Image: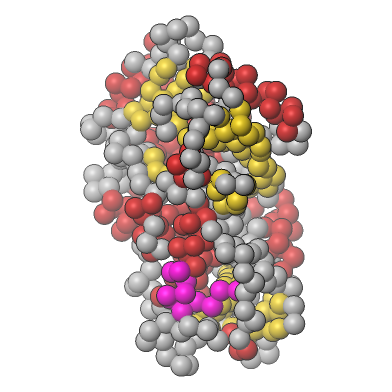
Amino acid sequence: MSDGTRSEELPAGNRPARPGAGTPEDARTAVVVGGGLAGVSAALSLADAGLRVTLLEGRPRLGGLAFSFRRGELTVDNGHHVYLRCCTAYRWFLDRIDGAELAPLQDRLDVPVLDADARPGRRLGRLRRDALPVPLHLGRSLATYPHLSLAERAKVGRAALALGKLDLADPALDERDFGGWLAEHGQSARTVEALWDLVGVATLNAVAGDASLALAATVFKTGLLSDPGAADIGWAHVPLGDLHDGLARRALDAAGVRTALRTRVTSVSPAADGRWTVEVPGQRLEADAVVLAVPQRETHGLLPEGALGDPDRLLDIDTAPILNVHVVYDRKVLGRPFFAALGSPVQWVFDRTAASGLGTGQYLALSQSAAQDEIDLPVAALRERYLPELERLLPGARDARVEDFFVTRERTATFAPAPGVGRLRPGARTKAPGLYLAGAWTATGWPATMEGAVRSGISAASAALAALDRPRDHLFDFEEAADRAFPGRVPEGAGAPLRGGLR
């Protein structure tokens, strides 16, 4: 969590306050603009290579859109974020900040799915894997999944096989929508709701009909068809701020990164000597390399002329909202850590009681993705909508007293994964030598996830180090990590590269 203190004045000349051990006095310098997961990952990667790094963040905390705040006695995450075992870059990030034990993975994928409209005895289904090779690892789960008919389950298998044959390098996939592809492959509206959108909305922040086939195929091929354990779910058992702010700041300090919070960058411009000038109120910093790790619209406003061929494309990358509903009951109403819902506006529900510090009762967080129709509804309307739905799904909630009800809204939570978005997303390098881009919205091949954000930061750092002729052998290697984590995974040539992840 941010301690609420104001940052010290930036030292002149972009000299870090605590240089890392062994950092030479004449080390190259870098400024990273933005303290989300992309910016922190870039800063750590650059500092680990011996650069003197300054990280500038306008907020009073690190963590970007995965953060925590206080509400009375509760520590609240703005939204519930999970990751998958296949998210090897985010797992590197957790290891790098000494936070892996605080965000453990399931031993084996197991997702309870409650159907509010089903008759008693068939309300609960489970999506879980066996210790069998792909694709048999999900065979028994799908064969007994009560929320689909026998015929629908059989067609799921055929669609999954067709999905596994798609070439993710084919640019034509980005022009198609996932919903249309599913319909062509025999998937009914019920199958899309009860299976494909159950996973896809949470990972893509869009329903199948609004999502790029390329991004959807990345998610499903990675999580379900690359390795039996690829989709095992992990989440923070502590507030996100403890990881993405507290531990991240500690790691940055240890690496010698100078971190300045509440520091807005007003301009980024090339200097006459081939270096870069970064201006903040009252000060000017110089650096050999600059990484812009801020949202696409903010990046557009900071880009110097000529840095991108068509910078206005950044403004064409639309955004999508996420709504989070928070309910505190006077007693326990949910006996499992989380579940997904069908037949209800409720999507995913997580028990955040222990992580929030709540002493009595139970605190549930509802994560509502693709929330365009609800993001601006008044709290009273959302309360009237969601409390009865929780009572339908959880009988124990019917007699419980609601102690608190509030919402958090992220109106620009992710970039919209619409068909055609791939051609709008820029890579890490710009046309301006020494200037690099990072952020989940850049061309990672991923939807807007924590994994994609970390990868973008590492890629930007790698591009900067290559241009500065600095060693990169310490950098996280995506393919090597994939091979190490999943030695039996389906190789990329077979159409299942190890990419994907939940927000």
Q: In this view, does 11 lie to the left or right of 444?
A: right
Q: Which quadrant would residue 55 be assigned to in this image?
A: bottom right
> What residue do we see at 30% from left, 35% from top?
108
- Vertical placement of residue 73 versus 225, above or below: below
The furthest residue to the bottom: 25
Q: In this view, does 227 lie to the left or right of 174?
A: left
- Vertical placement of residue 187 versus 376, above or below: above
Residue 259 painted magenta: yes
Rendered location of residue 294, percent (x, y): 63, 62
Q: Which quadrant would residue 286 be assigned to in this image?
A: bottom right
Is 104 in front, or is 293? 104
> What residue do we see at 67% from left, 72% from top?
263
Residue 236 painted magenta: no
Q: Is residue 306 left or right of residue 167?
A: right
Rendered location of residue 445, percent (x, y): 50, 50
> What residue do we see at 61% from left, 89% from top?
13
The furthest residue to the top: 119
Asked which colour scheme the image uses, the reply is secondary structure
> What residue do we see at 48% from left, 56% from top?
242
Can residue 475 be seen from the camera position used here? yes
- Vertical placement of residue 33 versus 420, above or below: below
Rendered location of residue 374, percent (x, y): 71, 32
Q: Which quadrant would residue 96 be assigned to in this image?
A: bottom left
Is 391 in front, or is 275? 391
Give the total number of marks visible in the rendering: 0
Is 283 in front, or is 133? 283
Q: Magenta segment, which residues?
A: 250-261
Rendered location of residue 36, percent (x, y): 56, 60
Can residue 443 be seen from the camera position used here? no
